[in-house]
């Protein structure tokens, strides 16, 4: 009798298991089909929005919402959740459920508000052709964009928390694509929300405003992008923007007494950012750097400054994609040649530094004028959003209420903050060659997380290379190589490479090419920073490895923040092999 009951129980369990497998198989096929439709319609939606076809976008949004809700429903029942606990296969079920949830959240909480905002803001009617922006619609779109931005930020956090590495390769690829898409959307919508909230006041809706524009040259790297090569003043009043004054860095001689600097800045860069305008962008935290730029301008010209905007030369490529070709001095620049023109060719074609400054000023004036007069508004917004996503625009406001919003956005240029979405490490690159050799440099940054000697560990490995021609000492202009003026052999590159770790973690191992090397250490807020001074001849490279342990280390979701370069460094992650 007992054996009979045992066979009966086993039979029932097998039947239930077979039914459960059949249940999740059928529902899984349906969920995957729905998600495929979401992906297909999302691609079409992006194209429709780019074309300004809001009617089609609305239809596609409804279709996406239907399929996303269906996928969520199919993957949220108790049977599906139970399969998520099965070893090996479980993470795949959990991931599909999480992807479906994210898709539904975005469809319900972001797409509809964004399309509502798009209906209320016709980019073609912004009045850019006259250099004036109609500020009235921004009050209407601010709230729906705020809701969409919050949804996308939450979706980005959830997408990063999916354990993609534990899933099958096709699903892992799909999760990677989801993260990229949601991350890009979060950046764009977040920037648009910030613009909607800030633009009326910042563009002089009630009182006139003045902003210093600092143009950074990536051929001579600084923490936030490059040395300040040109500087100007924008005036905004009632939505109308004008370029009111231009200046040269030669208008700002070195100060005998440096401006006040943070302890970390002095530890890493001595007092140079406080004495030289060109070196203020050594400071990685724009909330510290920008007030110094404003002070230098106000002390030199007496004009009160309401804010500072820093942009780099690579941003010009994105702007020219929106404006079309531009004549700069003897050159015709377009999106394909502007970077090499401004950061390399100009030094051979125009040897006189004063003439170079004049061409840079013409470039700034021309780009600004073209953006306000001839750029397609939709393309211009895309160019600005792309530049912001790459960290090539930083904005600071002297008005506390505005700065509170900016400082919590990617445009604020502050040091990253660790949180549920990600833990951050960073690499700062600062040239001390004195020339423009960083046009020829490349970097690769790799992170690894795990455990070393029983301690949670985050490893950051930076490979820095001088890709200049082997005959750079003679083939490149002296202004580019610095010709040994600052103690660096012509053609070589001398760089301060700074690596900082997660908040609260401390360095447990530091080496350069496997050997010990003198380093400078400092605290950037609650982050430990390690700085090497590296000298490389043409063709040479070096690899710096830093392991961080303690609070914050070993986080699976570790992201890299880095200095914007001419060519973005290759950033990736690898399995941890302890160096110590």
Image (tube, helix red, strand yellow):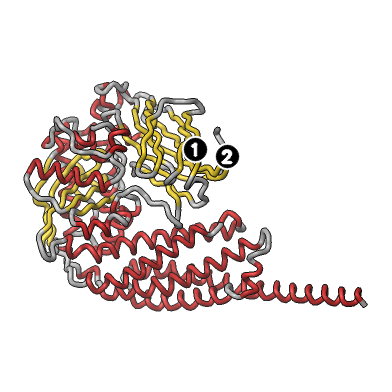
Q: Which mark is residue 547?
A: 1
Q: Residue at x 66, y 72 (%)?
A: 25
Q: Which mark is residue 478?
A: none
Q: Residue at x 26, y 53 (%)?
A: 319
* Up/down of 193 relative to 570, above or below: below
* Up/down of 241 relative to 349, above or below: below
Q: How far across and how far down the image is residue 285, in percent? A: 30, 45
Q: Is residue 70 left or right of residue 427?
A: right
Front one among 352 and 262: 262
Q: Residue at x 23, y 32 (%)?
A: 272
Q: Secondary structure at mark 1?
A: strand
Task: Count residues near mark 2 (Cα–Cα under 10 Å), then give few for <14, some for 14-19, many for 20+.
Answer: some
> Is residue 15 at least partly visible in the picture?
yes
Q: How far across and how far down the image is residue 241, in percent? A: 13, 58
Outermost residue to the left: 302
Task: Count residues near mark 1 (Cα–Cα under 10 Å), then give few for <14, some for 14-19, many for 20+.
Answer: many
Q: How far across and how far down the image is residue 470, in percent? A: 38, 25
Q: Which residue is mark 2?
A: 452
Instruction: Name the quadrant of the N terminus.
Output: bottom right
Look at the numbered discs 1 and 2 and tell me whether their residues touch, using CB distance below 8 Å.
yes
């Amino acid at each position: 009798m007992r054996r009979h009951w045992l066979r009966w129980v086993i039979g029932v369990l097998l039947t239930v298991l077979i039914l459960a497998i059949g249940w999740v198989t059928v529902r899984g096929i349906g969920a995957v089909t729905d998600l495929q439709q979401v992906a297909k319609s999302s691609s079409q939606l992006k194209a429709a929005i780019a074309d300004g076809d809001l009617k089609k976008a609305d239809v596609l949004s409804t279709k996406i919402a239907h399929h996303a809700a269906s996928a969520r429903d199919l993957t949220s029942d108790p049977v599906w959740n139970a399969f998520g606990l099965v070893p090996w296969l479980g993470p795949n079920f959990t991931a599909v459920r999480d992807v479906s949830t994210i898709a539904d959240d975005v469809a319900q909480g972001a797409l509809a508000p964004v399309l509502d905002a798009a209906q209320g803001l016709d980019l073609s009617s912004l009045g850019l052709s006259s250099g004036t922006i109609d500020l009235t619609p921004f009050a209407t779109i601010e709230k729906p964009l705020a809701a969409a931005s919050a949804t996308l930020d939450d979706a980005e956090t959830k997408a990063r928390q999916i354990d993609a590495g534990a899933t099958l390769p096709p699903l892992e690829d799909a999760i990677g694509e989801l993260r990229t898409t949601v991350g890009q959307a979060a950046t764009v919508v977040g920037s648009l929300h910030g613009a909607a909230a800030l633009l009326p006041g910042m563009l002089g809706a009630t009182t006139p405003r003045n902003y210093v524009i600092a143009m950074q040259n990536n051929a001579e790297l600084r923490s936030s992008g490059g040395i300040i090569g040109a500087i100007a003043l924008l005036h905004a009043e009632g939505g109308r923007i004008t370029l009111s004054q231009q200046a040269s860095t030669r208008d700002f001689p070195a100060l005998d007494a440096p401006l006040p600097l943070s302890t970390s800045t002095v530890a890493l860069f001595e007092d140079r950012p406080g004495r030289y305008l060109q070196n203020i962008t050594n400071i990685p935290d724009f909330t510290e750097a920008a007030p110094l730029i404003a002070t230098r301008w106000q002390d030199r010209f007496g004009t009160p400054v309401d804010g500072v905007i820093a942009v780099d030369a690579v941003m010009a490529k994105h702007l020219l994609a929106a404006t079309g070709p531009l004549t700069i001095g003897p050159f015709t620049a377009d999106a394909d040649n502007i970077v090499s023109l401004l950061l390399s060719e100009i030094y051979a074609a125009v040897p006189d530094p004063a003439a170079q400054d004049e061409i840079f000023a013409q470039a700034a004036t021309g780009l600004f004028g073209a953006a306000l007069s001839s750029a397609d508004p939709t393309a211009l917004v895309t160019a600005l959003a792309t530049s912001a996503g790459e960290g090539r625009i930083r904005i600071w406001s002297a008005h506390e209420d505005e700065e509170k919003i900016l400082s919590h956005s990617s445009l604020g240029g502050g040091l990253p903050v660790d949180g549920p979405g990600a833990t951050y490490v960073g690499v700062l690159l600062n040239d001390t060659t004195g020339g423009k050799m960083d046009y020829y440099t490349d970097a690769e940054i790799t992170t690894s997380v795990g455990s070393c000697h029983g301690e949670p560990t985050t490893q950051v490995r930076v490979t820095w290379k001088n890709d200049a021609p082997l005959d750079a000492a003679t083939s490149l202009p002296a202004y580019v190589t610095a010709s040994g003026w600052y103690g660096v052999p012509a053609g070589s590159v001398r760089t301060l490479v700074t690596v900082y770790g997660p908040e609260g973690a401390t360095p447990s191992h530091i080496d350069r090419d496997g050997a010990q090397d003198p380093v400078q250490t400092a605290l950037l807020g609650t982050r430990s920073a390690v700085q090497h001074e590296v000298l490389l001849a043409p063709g040479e490279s070096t690899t710096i490895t830093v392991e961080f342990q303690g609070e914050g280390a070993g986080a699976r979701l570790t992201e890299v923040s880095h200095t914007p370069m001419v060519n973005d460094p290759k950033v990736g992650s690898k399995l941890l092999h302890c160096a110590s």
